[in-house]
Amino acid sequence: MPIEETDELRRILEYDRVAVVGASTSYEKAAHIVPAYLQRHGYEITPINPNADEIFGEQTYDSLADVTEPIDIVEIFRPSAEVPEIVEQALARDDVKVIWMQLGIRHDEAAQTAEAAGLEVVQDHCMKVEHGRLIRHPMD
């Protein structure tokens, strides 16, 4: 079952290395706003976008397979139909702990595949909203 409980979400938000599949160069899109917020709050962001060279001051990668740095959370900003392929890429790695599908994105079958392989899954939740709700920072 995808994670919904507050304590579990809070625990997941303690991971700090986030690969953002579908990171956007467009400042007005959630796929830019959310990871930029996370980066400002101390997360190491690795943008995945084959159409850009750099986002958030970080080198972009074409796919999860191309990332050489460790990843804790794969945050997905792609259509739900693309989630199974992204989950398969995540499962091919040995470092991913969580699949996080952004608000409006869910794929129950891919979530079950990820969970069966030992990954935790969050569906249809905004990481920025959950961080703001569950994690307090003295500078906020």
Image (cartoon, helix red, strand yellow):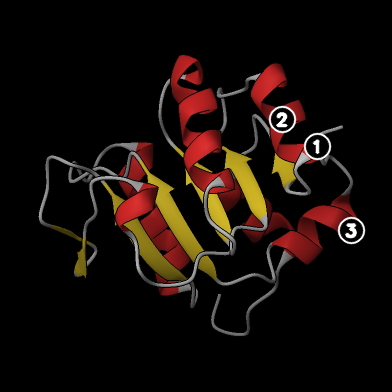
- Crowd tier of the residue under label 1, counting other residues whose Cα lies within 10 Å: few below 14, some 14–19, many 20 or above: few
Q: Residue 7 — which label?
A: 3
Quadrant position of residue 117 = top right
Label 2 to label 1: alpha-carbon separation: 5 Å
Q: Is residue 4 above or below residue 135?
A: above
What is the x, y in percent for residue 56?
A: 24, 63
Element under label 2?
helix
Where does the image place residue 134, in percent across and percent down from the top left? 75, 61
Disc 2 marks which residue? 113
Which residue does the image show at 72% across and 41% down from the upper left?
A: 121
For the point 22% across and 46% down, which residue is it? 27
Q: What residue sits 24% from the left and 54% below the top?
A: 61
Are dots 2 and 1 in contact, CB under 8 Å?
A: yes
Q: Which residue is mark 1?
A: 116
Crowd around label 2: few <14 · some 14–19 · many ≥20 (10 Å): some
Element assignment for label 1: helix
| Mark 3 → mark 2, Cα distance in angstroms | 23 Å
The amino acid on which the numbered mark 2 sits, given as a three-letter code, is: Thr
- Quadrant of the image occupied by residue 87: top right
Vertical placement of 11 versus 86: above or below? below
Whether residue 99 is situated above or below residue 55 in the rendered picture: above
Locate residue 48, reporting x and y percent: 30, 49
Q: Residue at x 64, y 29 (%)?
A: 124
Name the image quarter holding the N terminus: top right
Describe residue 52's horizontal placement relative to residue 104 as left or right. Answer: left
Q: Amino acid at mark 1?
A: Ala
